[in-house]
Amino acid sequence: MIAQQIGGKAVRDAFFLSQFDVASLPTMMVVSALVSIAVVRGVMGRPASWLVTRGFPASAALLLGEWALAMVRPDLAAVALYLHIAVFGSVLISGFWSLVTDYFDPHTARQKMGQIATGASAGAVLGGLLVERVGATLSVTAAFPLLAAFHLLCGVLILPLRTPAGRRATASDADAGIREGLQVMKRLPYLRHLASLVFVGAVSAALIDFAFKAEVATSLAQGESMMRFFALYYTAIGITTLIVQSALSRRALEKLGLAGTAATLPASVVVGSVGMLFVPGLWSALAARGAEATFRSSLFRSGYELFYSPVAPRDKRATKTAIDVLWERLGDVAGGVAAKGLLFLGPVVARSAILALAAALGGIALWLCRRLHAGYVEALEARLLDKGQKAAAATAAQSVQVESLLLSVSGGMSTILSKEEFEALRRADVAEDAPTEEPVRDELERAFLDLRSGDRQRIRTVLEREPLDAALVPQVIPLLSEDKLAHAARQALLPSVERIAGQLGDVLTNVDADLVLRRRIPSLLSRGAERSAAVLIAGLGDRKLAVRYRCGRALQRLHSRNVELGLVSKDVFGLVLDEVRRARRVLEGNQQLADPQGTHSEEAARFEKLVRKRAQKRLAHIFHLLALALPRKPLQIAFRGLETGDAHLRGTALEYLDSVLPPDVRTPLWPFLTKEPIQDLPQRPREEIVEDLMKSSIHLKMDGERES
């Protein structure tokens, strides 16, 4: 496809300038752009597969017809070829990239984009070399059948990617497609910014292209020699594009991000225009136009196409072809009109004005690129929410199971005694410590004795009495560990939770206190305010994951109520890194214990199950913490996406996390998100690893409690 595009441009430019004066070039740019706009109107809203499976064979047939026309009316054939390349090139390339972003999720698309774009760069070299050889041995028109053969081959190669074509497009379909596209762009500012970037880039490219071809027309002879020059020029562009693409594309996407990678194009326009302005001549024009073409086909293309990956398929179908072709053709119209108008100032003044305008537009495009990063993250968030809702509807059972990791309470420490034995001992202790019957001096003393009596009915009577006296709080807090009294105790403590946050914090941070009690306190504190938040933040440093997990959930609830936590993003990410460091040692141990021969003993299987369960809960805790610094709902969907079988949702989740996490957090956390093995493991004795895993697994049993 790109070989045909590059070869077609070389033949088009040489053939047109052989038949017409360079001053007619702006007019031809405007006409071809208007024709492209009319064609885009006819394909708006149609699936990309419908477009490419019909477009490639149709293009090949038209090229053969133009070849026959060139034998009798070369001037008409030159105009027809110019219109052909302008219309089919942009439309078919846009359709192909739409297929790419439809077939891959955002994260996979970023990984594959470099390979696909490298193939495109290699095609550019091939197309330029073949056309140059044709120009060296035959006539310009002899290249027409070669170009037709390329598109015919494309039509065959695209067949495995096609989808059902549907019914034939009609004028009403086109009008509906245009209306839908405008509505989508009105609803999504992100797509408006993309359209603006394409428009501004097209205007600046048209201006530089005109200045470049004006230099070529005054410096070279017409005919085959000019076609050879353009063929060699486009071949050189293909080679430099291939080098830049293969060497820098993936690195640029990782280091600069999508917006920074796309910004390389307007930056090259600014530098090239200023260079041509101060250093006139063919070589400076060649360098400026070559840099623009190189970055457009390499780094810019790699970043720009990925901007569409989080856009919903329906929205993308309604807008992408219009943005890629219609807005670019409108930019060509504006560029052609501007160049035509500036020519009235005279050749010298017009040249300077054209280059100055191109440089200014490059600066505007740089500003637009900066705006796109925030829009891309918002689009990923919206896509995550949409995919999450659909995944929840399609796989309700699985979604409920995963969601429970975020929204339900689980965990606890296995104990030697059963619950029944533990409660029996507690009643015995209470009965042993209970005072003998004495005269009750006042109501408060009676309530105190009732709370210590062990009689649930008497205890409930005190707990249901409002308000709870402050002196009774130390007696009520331990009741949170009693399954049958926990709810009543919680309701009694709730009205004064912020006032008693210090007492609750003393129990929460007491490592010798009952773990069930400590695990239930964070839920109570989640109904408080700033003092409760301070206690919960202290609990995030506890050595028990069960306690840290519930403190994180409680803080998330406070955060959702706009309670001031006193945490900044740096503090939150520091807590995440602490949690990752805690998890890494156990994960390393499990990885080292894995049997390289693939045989799993019963012991290894038990360890693997325990570690996987704990790692899943730890990851949920990490996402609770991240939600204190990043949008909560997209993070919940992203967590669900990491655990689901939906590859597209998982890829979107990874791309979102890759975009919003700071690099110093993303790098150590990434193995836990992707479940990839940790590299460069430290060597430790097997006995030490087993001991670590046993310590870790002791807290994995669930006690079946339910919290409101």
Image: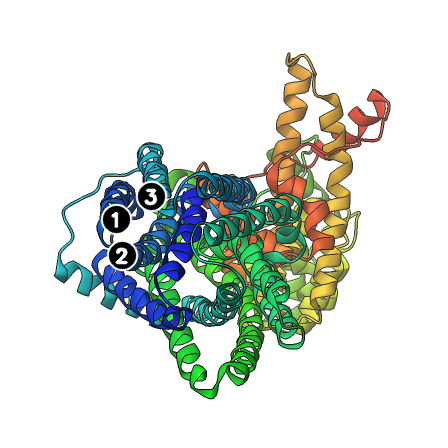
CB-based contact (under 8 Å), mark 2 and mark 1: yes
Residue that carries the numbered disc 2 in the rendered image = 80
Q: Which residue sits at x=65%, y=53%?
A: 252
User: Residue 606, percent across and down?
Assistant: 64, 22
Give me the C-alpha separation between circle 3 and circle 2.
Answer: 12 Å
Residue 339 in the image: above or below residue 615: below
210 and 265: which is toward the camera: 210
Q: Identify the element where label 1 is drawn.
A: helix
Q: Identify the element where label 3 is drawn.
A: helix
40 and 564: which is toward the camera: 40
Q: Residues within 10 Å of mark 3 (few under 14, many from 20)?
A: many
Give me the C-alpha separation between circle 2 and circle 1.
Answer: 7 Å
Amino acid tagged 1? Glu
Q: Earlier in the sequence, mark 3 or mark 2?
A: 2
Q: Which residue sits at x=76%, y=43%?
A: 582
Q: Which residue sits at x=40%, y=83%?
A: 341
Residue that carries the numbered disc 3 in the rendered image = 144
Farthest residue to the front: give it. Answer: 221
Residue 689 in the image: above or below residue 645: above
Give me the C-alpha separation between circle 1 and circle 3.
Answer: 8 Å
Q: Earlier in the sequence, mark 1 or mark 3?
A: 1
CB-based contact (under 8 Å), mark 1 and mark 3: yes
Residue 624 visible to the viewer: yes
- Residue 66 numbered tag: 1
